[in-house]
Amino acid sequence: MRLKRHKICVDDFELLTIIGRGAFGEVRLCREKTSGNIYAMKKLKKSDMVIRGQVEHVRAERNLMAEVASHCTVKLYYSFQDTEYLYLIMEYLPGGDIMTLLMREDTLTEPVARFYIAETILAIESIHKHNYIHRDIKPDNLLLDKNGHMKLSDFGLCKPIDCSKLSTLSEDEPMGDDNLKESMDVDSSLSETANGRRWRSQHEQLQHWQMNRRKLAFSTVGTPDYIAPEVLLKKGYGMECDWWSLGAIMYEMLVGYPPFYSDDPITTCRKIVHWRNHVKFPDDSRLSPEARDLICRLLCDVDHRIGGAGADQIKAHPWFRGVAWDKLYEMEAAFKPQVNDELDTQNFMKFDEVSV
């Protein structure tokens, strides 16, 4: 009753370190003054969201986080607004994200990759069960708790599906920034090097990806590396697009860079649309036949993509043989992040304090 009488606002929180910054605002650590509990506060500028037509996306994000009670997804505790900003108060996961882990490790062994791909499958499955498509599955949105277990975050591009009316979405707007619109008009005669560089070796491509990874992640355009071809082509798409993203992440975990990486996002989009010419494994990669098979069955056309009949189809793949799906979050995680205390932000990028 006391909580109901008291309308929560930003003044109820002590604002601490910034741990993320995006197109519409920032994410920072905060402490609730009455309880002392630590949270992550996502602060979004309302005028920017209206101008860029993102209001429905943010509403879907809030609704999904409130609706999906899963240990595989980031929890939402409060949402409120003032005249200028919308605030989402979420659980803080101090282990950083999978992107940070990949930058530190270059590549993961198959057992470690299997663990995190399996937890990602459970997270995507929990979203799909509530009839939402995530549409933005990428390493930056896979966060680690203090024990190293993964939770899916950032539901800003989620789309609800009305199952009584349709099974696919028809998109009027492209994914990401206007700069990606050009990618929808694809010239099939373009060669791999038309607008991008031909890498001399896997090592050179890996080095270039590592240098640009952070810059791409926090640009307003972002990176299209994990977007399914049917989304880019705006042909209408369904939940299968999230499984494509899973395949791109699995490839990156085991090879060291995404399968369609290029110097610029437009070339990456062209490669994705013409995926048949570009799903290749480096000569020196030592992937098991099962791993290669699963990647190829995820990075393919919608009609043949594994997962189209549900997550159980992927779980049954031979690469996951021996995985105890119902015990994953009870097991010791494949990687234990260094976390000193509840306010530790060492696993996140450092951001300067600027007004948003």
Image (spheres, rainbow, N blue to C red):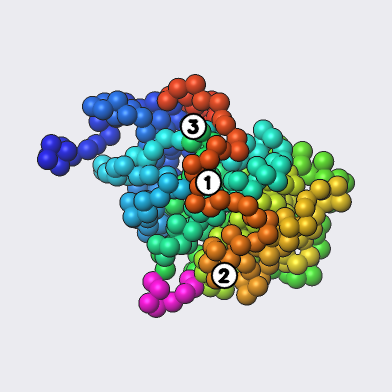
Q: Amino acid under label 3?
A: Lys
Residue appearing at x 38%, y 44% in the figure: 75
The residue under label 3 is 146
| Quadrant holding the N terminus | top left
Answer with the quarter of the image where residue 55 lies. Answer: bottom left
**Residue type at numbered disc 1:** Leu
Residue 355: horizontal and vertical position, in percent? 41, 32
Residue 317 appears in the rendering: yes
**Secondary structure found at label 2:** loop
318 falls in the magenta region: no
Q: CA distance from mark 1 to mark 3?
A: 16 Å
Q: Position of residue 139 (x, y in %)?
A: 59, 45
Check disc 2 and report the residue beneath it: 308
Position above or below: 327 against 356: below
Q: Could you say which quadrant of the image residue 112 lies in?
A: top right
Residue 169 is covered by the magenta coloring: yes
Labels 2 and 1: the sequence-earlier one = 2
* 276 horizontally vs 57: left or right: right
Where in the figure is residue 266, as x and y percent of width and height? 67, 57
Residue name at image x 66 percent, y 36 percent: 103
Residue 15 locus on image (x, y percent): 35, 27
Give amino acid for label 2: Gly
